[in-house]
Amino acid sequence: MASFREGKVVEVLQTTPVIRVRVESDGYELDAVGYVGMIDVPEVGHRVIVNATGIDLELGTGGVGFLLWDLDGAGRIEPGPGHIVKMRYTPWQTNVMSVEAPESEYHELFTEPRGLEGMPVVVCGLHSQFPAIAAGIKERDPGARVVLLVTDAGALPVRMSKLIGASTGRVIESTISVGNSFGGDLEAVNVFNGLIAARHVAQADVAIVAPGPGIVGTSTAFGFSTIDQGQSLDAAGALNGRPFLALRISSKDPRPRHEGVDAHSLTVLSVATHARTTVVVPELPEPDAQRVEFDLKGAGIDDRHDIRLESGREGVDYLVDLGIEPSSMGRSIREDEVPFLAAAAAGRAAVT
């Protein structure tokens, strides 16, 4: 069950692109996030209702409060344009101008089937990998237009991601939120139309498909939210795009299922997708390189897909030079660079 608390705002920390306030509740303070357009910026002293579920569960990602209502605020916020509703039938459902909706200026583009015209589509299972993928693309082809699709496998609000803010205008040009994810530069009902919008509305040369931060895993074969990578790869292939997978690899993760080629990547490639995919393997020193080869062959990936070796070093260096330094499972690039080498290699392969 969700946990709701009433508290009083003691400090306004940030007003854009998200609202961040400090709230005193039951004798201690917590930070809470709100989304512009869903709640006004509360003033110091206002009573607010906060969803504290993530805090009570002691989550890492998502372990903050979320503002639901300002009891002393102005009240109702008028809905924006568009009739497509995301987070449907929840207390937080919100309407958006979906790119393919009848009231959208782009509606006619979607009334007949369209393809991707061979556009590369790089899919990954970690939000933290997308900047390295984009850096691998930009290092190889600085003029390439890179568009990021954010799925609903992780955080639904695009604005929750600090990495997107740091990357936009530097390694990506724009964002498209698909499914129940919301808040991108464009909105789409699903990943199929999201990819078509990337190509024909945002004029992408390359699309990246990634979850938001905060994915779900259950230590079971199929119980992870980013199994939707399979659908994204299938969509890319079905729409005459070129699907690439950025492997999730680690040499530092202490959990056996995440060591070497992650079990999630192997499941996506062996079960969850039917599209023949270019699986990009980064150039790694031994014994990491041998472990990756062993894992892919052991799962039969080399029979179902095309394996390609590519350098990720240039893309990672490009990313670091820009001052964008993502972390994976709490580990920085300096602490575990392998997942970022894999991501950058996939981006580089997509434009080579």
Image (cartoon, rainbow, N blue to C red):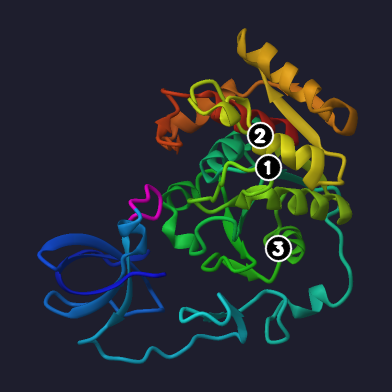
Q: Is residue 252 left or right of residue 279?
A: left
Q: Position of residue 229 (x, y in %)?
A: 70, 48
Residue position for label 3: 194
- Image quadrant occupied by the N terminus: bottom left
**The residue tagged with tag 3: helix, strand or loop?**
helix
Label 1 is placed on what type of residue? Ala
Q: Is residue 351 visible?
A: no
Q: Nearer the viewer, mark 1 or mark 3?
A: 1
Of 233 and 287, the residue lying toward us:
287
Please report the residue visible at 81 percent of the width from the left and 46 percent of the height from the top: 273
Residue position for label 1: 221
Tally of numbered discs: 3
Q: Is residue 62 magenta?
A: yes
Q: Is residue 302 magenta?
A: no
- Image quadrant occupied by the C terminus: top right
State which region is magenta: 58-63
Q: Is residue 274 left or right of residue 73?
A: right
Instruction: Kindly report the distance in space between the C-alpha atoms of the residues bearing marks 1 and 2.
Output: 8 Å
